[in-house]
């Protein structure tokens, strides 16, 4: 098990101070991989570096993307944080459930912007959603506070002797990259036959499709089979 398998993704962060504080929180628990998606401030900048204190190396090595999807191509499991329960058919987990995650895989924790959190569209890319227990009358947590709570929990989990649920070693779970590729192939075929009608419902239909594929925990073989099915259907038209 390695801390190097774990990434922390900040989606559209708004404040330089929070980005720096997140980097510092990561280093407190020996995590190194920071990913920043479309940050509002110039990245990096002097304020980010100043508030990161001894974690400037994490900022300098971080990856910056314009949107979420390409950031997930090398990730196996995405856990999205949310202060509110989503009425979606997605697996909702608590902090104690993080002990069951297989950290031999590449795991990413996804955090939304300070003002609006994560949209349902961004949540649709996740395998799980995670709620941090808080005062029900004041649920909002600072971005860096949320990150440090999760980092502390995960650090304890991967350094404990608690084992995750076992699966057959012969079954290779599909990578996030494979699932993204398969999903996009399915979506393109559906686009070609005019499936997304009416047009205004397309965003929610895409969210639902991604929710279906990501929660299924497909194997690599199953993903290849489905990709073959979608490709064959396209040839038949």
Image (cartoon, helix red, strand yellow):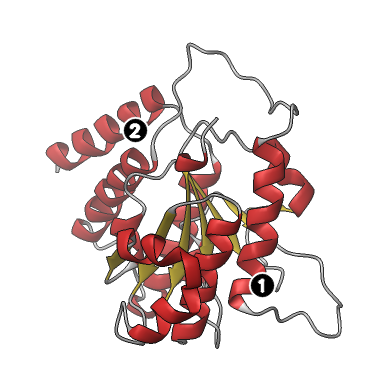
Work out whether 117 lies above or below 228. Answer: below
Please state which of the two labelled residues, at mark 1 or mark 2, is closer to the viewer. Answer: 1
Q: Position of residue 36 (x, y in %)?
A: 38, 68
Q: Nearer the viewer, residue 121 or 202?
A: 121
Work out whether 13 lies above or below 128. Answer: below
- When asked about the image quadrant of residue 138, the answer is bottom right
Q: Position of residue 72 (x, y in %)?
A: 36, 53
Q: Residue at x 48, y 17 (%)?
A: 171
Q: Nearer the viewer, residue 183 or 78?
A: 78
- Judging by the rendered image, the residue that carries numbered circle 1 is 145
Q: Secondary structure at mark 2?
A: helix
Specify whether 115 is left or right of 227: right
Q: Residue at x 53, y 57 (%)?
A: 27
- Judging by the rendered image, the residue that carries numbered circle 2 is 226
> Which quadrant: the N terminus?
top right
- When asked about the image quadrant of residue 156, the answer is top right
Specify whether 165 is left or right of 204: right
Q: Which mark is residue 95?
A: none
Work out whether 217 lies above or below 196. Answer: above
Q: Residue at x 39, y 43 (%)?
A: 176
Distance from disc 1 to disc 2, alpha carbons, whole Å, reads 40 Å
Whether residue 143 is visible to the viewer of this picture, yes or no, is yes
Whether residue 111 is visible to the viewer of this picture, yes or no, is no
Q: Position of residue 77 (x, y in %)?
A: 50, 44
Count residues near mark 2 (Cα–Cα under 10 Å), then give few for <14, some for 14-19, many for 20+.
some
Q: Specify which label sits upstream in the sequence, 1 or 2.
A: 1
Q: Position of residue 164 (x, y in %)?
A: 68, 28
Q: Nearer the viewer, residue 203 or 166?
A: 166
> Which quadrant: the C terminus?
top left
The residue most toward the front is 54
Q: Nearer the viewer, residue 179 or 81?
A: 81
């Amino acid at each position: 098990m390695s801390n190097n398998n774990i990434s922390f993704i900040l989606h559209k962060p708004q404040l330089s101070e929070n980005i720096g504080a997140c980097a510092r929180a990561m280093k407190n628990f020996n995590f190194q991989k920071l990913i920043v998606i479309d940050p509002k401030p110039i990245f990096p900048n002097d304020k980010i570096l100043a508030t990161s204190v001894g974690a400037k190396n994490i900022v300098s090595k971080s990856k910056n993307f314009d949107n979420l999807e390409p950031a997930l191509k090398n990730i196996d499991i995405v856990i999205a944080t949310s202060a509110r329960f989503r009425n979606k058919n997605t697996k909702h987990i608590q902090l104690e459930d993080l002990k069951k995650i297989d950290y031999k895989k590449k795991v990413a924790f996804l955090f939304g912007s300070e003002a609006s959190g994560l949209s349902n569209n961004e949540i649709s890319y996740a395998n799980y959603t995670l709620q941090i227990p808080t005062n029900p009358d004041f649920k909002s947590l600072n971005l860096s506070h949320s990150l440090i709570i999760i980092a502390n929990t995960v650090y304890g989990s991967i350094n404990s002797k608690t084992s995750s649920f076992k699966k057959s070693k012969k079954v290779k779970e599909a990578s996030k990259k494979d699932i993204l590729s398969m999903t996009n192939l399915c979506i393109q075929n559906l686009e070609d036959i005019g499936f997304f009608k009416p047009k205004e419902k397309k965003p929610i239909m895409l969210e639902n499709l991604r929710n279906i594929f990501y929660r299924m925990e497909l194997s690599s073989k199953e993903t290849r089979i489905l990709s073959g099915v979608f490709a064959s259907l396209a040839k038949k038209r």
